[in-house]
Amino acid sequence: MRAATAAFAFLAALAPALAAAGGWEFLGPVPDAITGMSDPSRGSLLVSTQSGGVFRSEDGGETWDPVTAGLPAGPGVRFSSIANDAGDSRVFYMAGQEPAVDTLNGDLLRSVDGGRSWAFADTGLGGGFPVKIVSSADPAGGTILYTTVCIFDLFPTPCRLHTFASRNRGATWNEVANAPTNASVLAAHGATVYAGGSDGLFRSSNEGADWEEIDEGLARCDVRALAIDPSNPLVLWAGQGEDGPRFVCGDVYRSVDGGAHWSSTGLGRDVTAVATDSTRVVAGATRSGFFYPPGGVAESLDGGATWTDLELPTATALRIALGSRGFSLYAGTDVGLYRLPLVDILPVTPPEAARTSSRGSNGDR
């Protein structure tokens, strides 16, 4: 018993080092910035790139196929946010934009065959272009979609962010009239929606009908990312950063009460993305210059108390996601997609307990 306990303690202590032991693997699909990425643990893996290409993989990024069927084409066409449907792993949504003479036209597209082909799904969105898509399971059993659309009142002045919702998988959209300004929908769980931006972080508990600001403990900085603990929706992780040269912002914050109160984890990086699988939280960040805090990817296995740098080969992590059952971490960077094998340390069952369990399952002898 003492030896087994000591072995488990030794392995647990090595967990952070083992997580990065395999090293990052470059997956491509091209040496270009990753602008959108689907959830690698649900069905096909899809990525969009800065040059406009969209790629699909059935083996976790080992091999790729370019996707063109149903997508708009031409100079300047770009694609960004990609979201999995909350209820159907074959359905995906993707945001796009096309340059026009005096503005930018936006597209929202849907695939119902695992990302092989696409069709427009933007009725009701109006002008502008989508910048973020979020899918949530409807409490009644359906799917609720939210998208943030950047609409120009007068091009080329800065656009205004508007929030739209769909309850028929993107067939039609309706604007969320009371959504906060200067905020992009970041995450949703059931009827609860979170939107953040330069004006703070906001929450709606009734599918966007009413909103409240939830920033107690947060710095007055851009809220760029939000992750909901899959085993406890009251546990949230928010990533902050800034676009200016001061660098007084940049951190990951944790809330254990649905966003009512927040506490800093002290990461101190310009955070662009956050992901969690309940056992770990991972933050992607950028680095803007020599005197700025590091970018790349950092991981915490103790609720944000301490962080380990995972030594991403490039300083810029634009998108991050955890693969199936926490076995791999994907980072979309400014030069392509990387994957890092993760090692989850499982409890060691002492021999005496194993024998007792075996006897119990077969009855007394």
Image: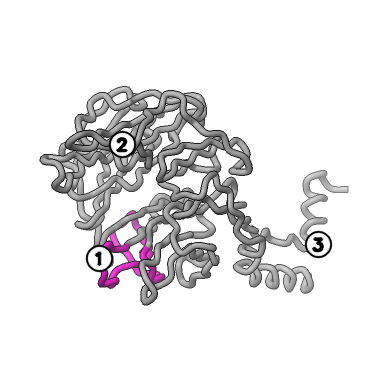
Classify 4 as above or below 150: below
**Residue identified by numbered label 3:** 352
Q: What element does badge 3 sit on?
A: helix
Rendered location of residue 133, percent (x, y)? 34, 39
Classify 30 as above or below 270: above
Q: What element does badge 2 sit on?
A: strand
- Looking at the picture, tell me which residue is in the foreground, 12 or 363: 12
**Residue identified by numbered label 1:** 244
Tag of residue 97: 2
Three-letter amino acid code of the residue under disc 1: Gly
Mark nearest the camera among 1 and 3 is: 1
Q: Residue at x 39, y 68 (%)?
A: 269
Label located before the other in sequence (3 or 2): 2
Most common secondary structure along the magenta stretch? loop
Residue 266 visible in this rendered orientation of the protein:
no
For the residues labelled 1 and 3, the Cα–Cα distance comes to 60 Å
Mark 3 and mark 1 in contact (Cβ < 8 Å)?
no
Mark 2 and mark 3 in contact (Cβ < 8 Å)?
no
Which image quarter is the N terminus in?
A: bottom right
Q: Residue at x 32, y 22 (%)?
A: 171
Rendered location of residue 149, percent (x, y)? 24, 39
Instruction: Point out the residue furthest to the right here.
Output: 365
Q: Quadrant of residue 83?
A: top left
Three-letter amino acid code of the residue under disc 2: Gln
In the image, which residues are magenta? 241-270
Three-letter amino acid code of the residue under disc 3: Glu
**Residue 361 painted magenta:** no
